[in-house]
Image (cartoon, rainbow, N blue to C red):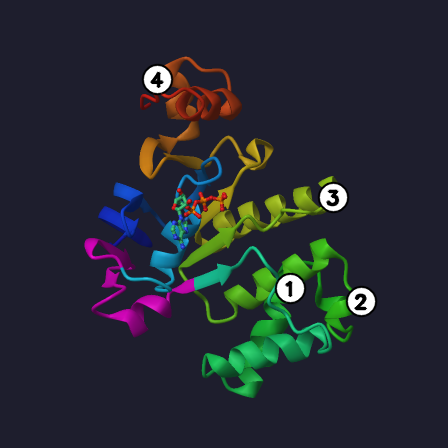
Amino acid sequence: MSAALQIDGLSFAYGAKKALDNVAFQVEPGECTILLGPNGAGKSTLFALITRLYDAREGRIALCGFDVKQQSLQALAKLGVVFQQTTLDPDLSVTQNLRYHAALHGIGKKQADKRIQEELERLAMYERRGEKVRQLNGGHKRRVEIARALLHKPSLLLLDEPTVGLDVPSRQAIVKHVHDLVKQQNLAVLWATHLIDEIDADDSLVVLHKGQIKANGRLAEILKNTGWADPGQVFQKLTQSDKGGTA
Ligand SMILES: Nc1ncnc2c1ncn2[C@@H]1O[C@H](COP(=O)(O)OP(=O)(O)OP(=O)(O)O)[C@@H](O)[C@H]1O
C-alpha cells in the first residue's frame, strides 16, 4: 500500500536562495508526524509544495501514490489542510461554513449534513453548530477548521501551526483531538509546529533545519539512538549549532 505522503529528493529555491535541499520522508496511515524546525527552516515552503501553491522542479511528492503534479486532482482529493491563519467566514454559522466547503468538494447536501454532524461530534462542537463563527473562541474555531478539513475524508491532514495563539487548555484539546483522529480513523497527519510540548511519545519526528532533514523517525527511536532526553534536546542539538549534524 502507498504511503499517505511520500516525498523524494525534493529541492526548491527562491531565486538563488535554497529553501529545501533534497528532502525525503514519508507519512503512513495512522501516523502523526511532527515537522519541527526553527524560523526559516523551510516548513511553509514544504507545505506550499504539498498543496501545490508552488511546483518543485526537483523531486517528487505523492499522496496515496498519486503524484501531485501528474495526477493532481486525485492527489489533492486525499488532502485536508488547516492553515496557520483562520479561513472561516466569521459572519456565517459553523454549519454554513462547513456546508460551503462540502459543496466545493462536490458533496451533496444530505451527505454533507451527515458528514458535518460526524466531524463536529468527534470534535465536541456539534452543539455549537448554529453559532456564528465570530462568537467562537480561538480554540473552537480551530476545531471547526479541523472538522472542515476532514469533511471529504482525506487520507492526510496537514496542520500548519494550528495552535499558535491559543491558551494552554485549548492547545491541549486540539493536540488530543488530532491524536485521537490518528488512532481511531487511521489518518496520517503532518503537523508543523515550534511547540515541543505538542509532541506525543508515539509520534514520528521530522526535524528540518536550513532546508535539510536533520532527523526522521519515531521519537522513541531517535531518543534511544542518540541518548538525548526529550524532543527539546533533539531540537536544540540539531538546530542550534552551526555544525548541525543528524540523528
Ligand atoms: N518568497 C520568498 N522569497 C525569497 N525567500 C523566501 C521566500 N519565502 C521564504 N523564503 C526563504 O526560504 C527559507 C525557508 O522559508 P520558510 O518560510 O519556508 O521557512 P519556515 O520554516 O516556514 O519559517 P517560519 O517558521 O518562520 O514560517 C527562508 O530562508 C526564507 O527566508
**Label ID, residue 135:** 2
In the foreground, 240 or 126: 240
Specify the quadrant of the image occupied by residue 4.
bottom left
Mark 3 or 4 closer to N-term? 3
Q: What residue type is labelled 2?
A: Gln
Residue occupying the point 46% across, 67% down: 153
Q: Considering only vertical position in the picture, is 111 above or below 192?
A: below
Mark 4 within 8 Å of ligand 1, using the beta carbon: no
**Residue designated by label 1:** 144
Q: What residue type is labelled 4?
A: Asn
Q: Position of residue 243 (x, y in %)?
A: 33, 19
Q: Which of marks 3 and 4 is in front?
A: 3
Q: Considering only vertical position in the picture, is 66 above or below 4?
A: below
**Label ID, residue 167:** 3
Q: Is mark 1 on a helix, strand or loop?
A: helix
**Residue designated by label 4:** 225
Mark 2: give few (<14), some (14-19) or many (20+) Cα within 10 Å: few
Q: Do the residues labelled 2 and 4 touch (CB within 8 Å)?
A: no
Mark 4 or 1 closer to N-term? 1
> Is 153 left, or right, of 76 in this rendering?
right
Q: Examine the rendering and report whether any part of residue 236 can be seen.
A: yes
Question: How far apart, in angstroms, are the residues tagged by discs 2 and 3?
Answer: 17 Å
Q: Position of residue 119 (x, y in %)?
A: 60, 65
Q: Is mark 2 on a helix, strand or loop?
A: helix
For the record, the magenta segment spans 56-79
Mark 4: give few (<14), some (14-19) or many (20+) Cα within 10 Å: few
Residue occupying the point 67% across, 44% down: 171
Mark 2 or 3 closer to N-term? 2
Mark 2 or 4 closer to N-term? 2
